[in-house]
């Protein structure tokens, strides 16, 4: 697909201080759009970044027919003009799985990846240079048909926006405090937990706000049926290290198929660790914490890459993990992942795709 390009009259000034970028605040000069009309993706274009014009009756605004992706572009440490995406084919694939679940049209993997490269090429200057920073990419699809009857939209808009983001750990790679949520749930069997769709995140706001007000940075989600099996942490996949083996929830419909999760599993296995993709309960984790078998815990997702967990709060009791220090395996996996993404370590997997 060819993308017609229109530039803004004036380019925006870049954020002046890369140490204060934080997340999702500094959007670039351009955005990419493709319309879905009459059963076809058409009119691919790159335009100045700006507000959308949408009917107030657009289906997305009423029934939440929406999906998105989250990925990053990095400058390579040895050649800062060299830009790479991390496993974008995985995001394309997941975007289409989300689309199918939400009754939306799929988009060819090649169009998805090319659309992202095309808009990044226009906004290269927005990719920050300092360690820990990157360009965050948000491909999105929304239902745009003007109608109030509950039905799948006949028209959609796919768009890609970009923003400069700072290090997830501006105060250093420190363990976080996690609230184990035993009342609210993120996803149920048969629901939409496996899709990256807005409604899942809307439903997570209240429990997360309550956890934040108690001093916890995220919630640990348990399964909807009996509130025992560990599913995810915030919008990240959760890992535990118990007796030198890794544990993470299996992909059975309620857990998001994290690209970071898959990469961490591969890296850990290649370092000689056993990885168990099987359900583990909060009682088992607490038991392991009491006997000392629980060595480490961390979340894995694009935004943080790896976020160490230092404390779990469950039913009135705090359980400290690894004396509230970053664990050895957590550190090792973090360095490998970031190292590959930024070209500090050779990418023997072919995960980086040059832009
Ligand atoms: C996006 C997301 C993840 C992480 O996926 P990555 O591809 O690793 O970024 C995990 N859980 C949830 C709920 C998510 O939305």
Image: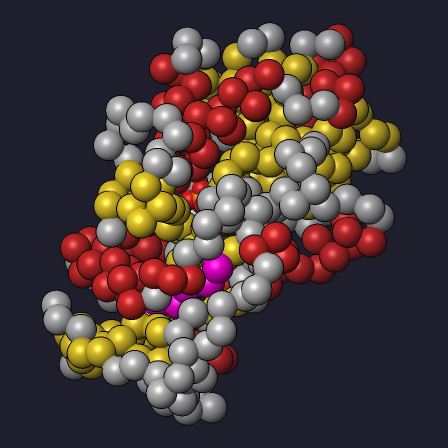
Q: Nearer the viewer, residue 56 or 9?
A: 9
In this rendering, is residue 108 above or below 289? below
Is any atom of residue 298 visible in this view? yes
Comparing 282 with 268, the one in front is 268
Left or right of 62? Residue 44 is left
**Of the pair 70 and 106, the residue shown nearer to us:** 70
What residue is rendered at 45% in x and 12% in y?
A: 274
Instruction: Give the quarter of the image for residue 340.
Output: top left
Left or right of 144: which side holds 42?
Answer: left
Q: Is residue 112 visible?
A: no
Task: Considering the whole magenta stretch, tell me its main secondary structure.
Answer: strand
Above or below: residue 325 compared with residue 68? above
Query: On screen, 214 above or below 52?
Result: above
232 on left or right of 125: right
Q: Position of residue 48 (x, y in %)?
A: 35, 80
For the point 52% across and 12% down, the residue is: 245
User: What range is drawn magenta here?
Assistant: 160-164
Quadrant holding the N terminus = bottom left
- Residue 142 on image: x %, y %: 38, 73
Residue 84 position within the rendered picture, expressed as x and y whole percent measured from the top left: 31, 46
């Amino acid at each position: 697909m060819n993308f017609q390009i229109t530039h803004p009259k004036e380019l925006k000034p870049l954020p002046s201080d890369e140490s204060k970028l934080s997340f999702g605040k500094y959007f670039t000069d351009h955005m990419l759009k493709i319309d879905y009309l009459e059963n076809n993706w058409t009119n691919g274009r790159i335009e100045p970044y700006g507000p959308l014009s949408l009917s107030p009756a657009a289906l997305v605004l009423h029934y939440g027919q929406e999906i998105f992706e989250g990925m990053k572009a990095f400058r390579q440490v040895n050649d800062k003009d060299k830009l790479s995406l991390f496993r974008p084919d995985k995001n394309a694939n997941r975007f289409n799985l989300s689309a199918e679940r939400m009754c939306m049209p799929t988009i060819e993997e090649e169009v998805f990846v090319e659309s992202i490269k095309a808009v990044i090429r226009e906004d290269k200057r927005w990719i920050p240079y300092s360690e820990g920073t990157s360009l965050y990419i948000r491909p999105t699809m929304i239902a745009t048909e003007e109608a109030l009857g509950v039905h799948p939209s006949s028209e959609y808009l796919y768009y890609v926006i970009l923003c400069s983001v700072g290090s997830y750990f501006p105060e250093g790679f420190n363990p976080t405090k996690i609230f184990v949520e035993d009342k609210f749930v993120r996803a149920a069997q048969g629901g939409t937990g496996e899709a990256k769709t807005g409604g899942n995140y809307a439903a997570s706001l209240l429990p997360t706000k309550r956890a934040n007000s108690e001093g916890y940075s995220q919630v640990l989600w348990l399964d909807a049926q009996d509130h025992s099996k560990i599913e995810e942490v915030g919008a990240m996949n959760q890992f535990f290290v118990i007796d030198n083996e890794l544990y993470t929830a299996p992909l059975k419909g309620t857990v998001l198929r994290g690209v970071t999760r898959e990469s961490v599993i591969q890296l850990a296995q290649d370092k000689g660790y056993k990885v168990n993709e099987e359900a583990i309960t909060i009682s088992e984790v607490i038991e392991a914490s009491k006997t000392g078998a629980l060595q480490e815990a961390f979340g894995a997702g694009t935004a943080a890459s790896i976020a160490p967990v230092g404390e779990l709060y469950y039913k009135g009791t705090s359980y400290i993990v690894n004396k509230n220090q970053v664990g050895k395996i957590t550190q090792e996996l973090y360095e490998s992942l970031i190292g590959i993404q930024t070209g500090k370590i050779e990418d023997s997997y072919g995960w980086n795709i040059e832009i």
